[in-house]
Amino acid sequence: MKQQEGVIKYQLNHTHQPISHPCSLTDINAWRTIAVRLELIGQSPERYQNIGFGNISQRIAPHSAQFIISGTQTGHIEQLSPEHYCLIVKAEPHQNRIQSRGLCKPSSESLSHAGVYAQNPAIQAVIHAHSPEIWQHTVALGLPHTSVDIPYGTVEMAMAVEQLFQSGKLAQTSLFTLLGHEDGVIAFGRNMEEAAWELIKHLSLAIRIEQQRINR
């Protein structure tokens, strides 16, 4: 059975109150807007039963385990405001638990973001996009990926992300696909720009593959 997008599957302890952002939202908002315009993040009647897709996050400080992330079902908003972001106070991927604070609840993919941040303190930004082009050309692009039988937003996904890092498959690239999550792609970097360009670079490579096949 095809899984519905945007459903929170982890145990959430959420405090509904405003948060003060210790980091600027300028970069995360700018790059998220670009992702929306490229249809890597968004909401469309033609895709996923009109459920919002994609999300973006960044650490609040270089050595902090906490991060801010776009709220669940904000895909229809091109430019987010502070109230559309949520602070992940504590994430426990292996226990399927998240503690958060904000005027909205965190993205359904927050566990996967937390799993990425936990692997390397140098990672400061994560983008979860939906790109049919990249996802469908996972093999042709030689991309690391999680298994087709691992659904998003689960302990199994967090463990699979950890295993990808430990395997060394992400030593040469900062992007991997989620084969059990339709069109799901995760890019990460030392800053928001680095993560975004990794995503855009692979999108261009995937489109190039498609055009080469058409022009044969």
Image (spheres, rainbow, N blue to C red):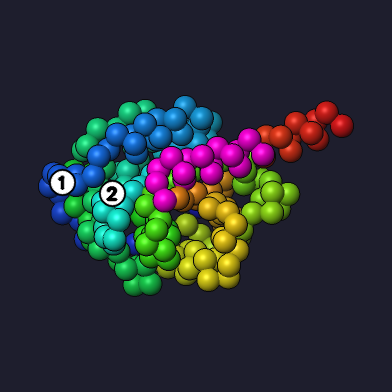
Regarding residue 46, the answer to whether it shows in the image is: yes
Q: Secondary structure at mark 1?
A: loop
Residues in magenta, as a range: 190-205
Instruction: Tell me which residue sits at (66%, 50%) in the image.
Output: 138
* Disc 2 target residue: 68
Q: What residue would you read off at disc 1?
A: 19
Residue at the image point whose x is 58% and y is 54% from the top = 173
Neighbor class of circle 1 (other Cα within 10 Å; few <14, some 14-19, many 20+) is some
Name the secondary structure under disc 2: strand
- Is there any visible trace of residue 149 in the rendered image? no
- Residue most toward the right? 216
Q: Main secondary structure of the magenta part?
A: helix
* Above-or-below relation of 143 to 115: above
Q: Which mark is residue 87?
A: none
Q: How many marks?
A: 2
Looking at this view, is 13 or 138 the one in front? 138
Write down the quadrant of residue 11 in the picture.
bottom left
- Residue at 58% in and 67% down: 168
* Closest to the observer, 216 or 10: 216
* Residue 179 relative to residue 64: left or right: right
Quadrant placement of the N terminus: bottom right
Neighbour tally class for label 2: few under 14, some 14-19, many 20 plus, Cα within 10 Å: many
Question: On the picture, is 40 further left or further right than 6?
Answer: right
> What is the x, y in percent for residue 214?
80, 30
